[in-house]
Image (tube, rainbow, N blue to C red):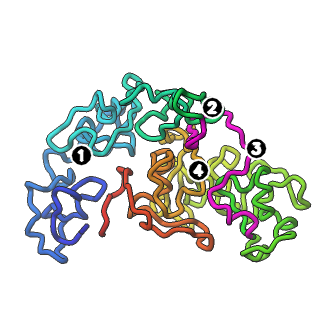
Amino acid sequence: WLGDGYCDVEVHNTRVCNWDGGDCCNETCVAADYDCSSASADVCLDPMYQPSTTPAATTSACSVSYPSYVGDGHCDTTGEYNTISCSWDGGDCCEDSCVSSDSYTCGTNSYDCKDPAYSTCSVDGSSFLGDGYCDSVGDYNTAACGWDSGDCCSASCEDGPQYTCGEYGYTCLDPDSSDSDSVCEVGFDSWLADGFCDTSGDYNTQACNWDGGDCCASTCGVNVTTTFDCEDEADSQVCLDPTAAEYVSTECAVAQESYIADGFCDGFGYGGYNTAACDWDGGDCCASTCVDGTEHSCSDDENHYECFDPDATDHAPGNCSVQFEEYLGDAYCDYNGGYNVAACAWDGGDCCVLTCTGPANEEEAVYTCGEGGYDCKDNTTCAVDFT
């Protein structure tokens, strides 16, 4: 549907869909399945081809490419729009400050409220706060609401009159929580002791016996028949077991040092790259610090940022802390549980057609893109089913 010569006015004529692939403006439409007869000045919303909204000089305080985007009713979460210098995109990103325009209706692409004047706990049912049940959707599990008043972390949850803490699981997003990690809880038990070192999630931890021994050459495959050959998968091993013969103490422990600062974000719990010790994957995981590598470009479609660097200008809001990190980017859209949120890069891209790529280790793939459907909330990509 994008770039097919027909202007889909109601659905795809948006910024993130590149104005229906150019179909809606006479200057950009290229005839394909259709003859571009639907393109006209009346439906052309691309500001590059609207004289009245052609990008103008910006002030030094609010330096953005398109000043007309500020205060237009559409929350621009990329670039420098949603910053204090641009008055939080002219108020577009908070429900209580947004004013709809002729082009956009407030809330159509959701909000990303960072303005401290409006960042308050606003939920439908205040009785759900602190009731012993983790409400992972509906803005309860946010800093403004005290992470559902403690319900979503085992260390802070208290039983309520109706619910017992943990009965329906936790989605701990509180960065200050001290939740216990003494129990081996992983998403795919079959990945333990299978011969491949799983560095995402909690597999390579003491509680999980260092992925069942998979992550050190001297412990892999001992007294167990593995699915994968330990020697063939040696490149995946990140030996953190202090009792293993080859263990070497290091702050930045990764399987492939060449992955650091290569222009591709190795995030979402994969391999320990996106950590302070590894300089946030050498800068790869923030748009403002990423530099193109020889094999990867920061702007590649399959690249998803997970910006945890507190010094980066595009530092991601919140903290991506889900029960099973291996569910991020596994090709299955996890609708609930705090996965499909901005801080988790929308379930590692799983929930949108154009960003779903599947797991890094294809041999351990459990799902294929679209198998569980999509729930695309990422307003930086085009939410289409057909391209």
Residue 341 percent coordinates (x, y): 45, 46
Q: Using residue 168 as the reference point, say whether residue 250 is left or right of it.
A: right
The residue tagged 4 is: 283
Q: Nearer the viewer, mark 4 or mark 1?
A: 4
Residue 319 percent coordinates (x, y): 55, 40
For marks 4 and 1, the one nearer the N-term is 1
Question: The residue under label 1 is which amino acid type?
Answer: Pro
- Up-down relation of residue 10 to residue 182 (above or below): below
For marks 1 and 2, the one nearer the N-term is 1
| Span of residues in magenta | 165-194
The residue tagged 2 is: 176
Within 10 Å of disc 1 (Cα), the crowding (few <14, some 14-19, many 20+) is some
- Of the numbered discs in the image, which one, if any, rests on residue 55? 1
Q: Nearer the viewer, mark 3 or mark 2?
A: 3
Question: The residue under label 3 is which amino acid type?
Answer: Ser
Q: Residue at x 53, y 60 (%)?
A: 329
The residue tagged 3 is: 182
Q: Secondary structure at mark 4?
A: loop
Q: Are marks 4 and 1 in contact (CB under 8 Å)?
A: no
Q: Nearer the viewer, mark 2 or mark 4?
A: 2
Within 10 Å of disc 4 (Cα), the crowding (few <14, some 14-19, many 20+) is many
Question: The residue under label 4 is which amino acid type?
Answer: Gly
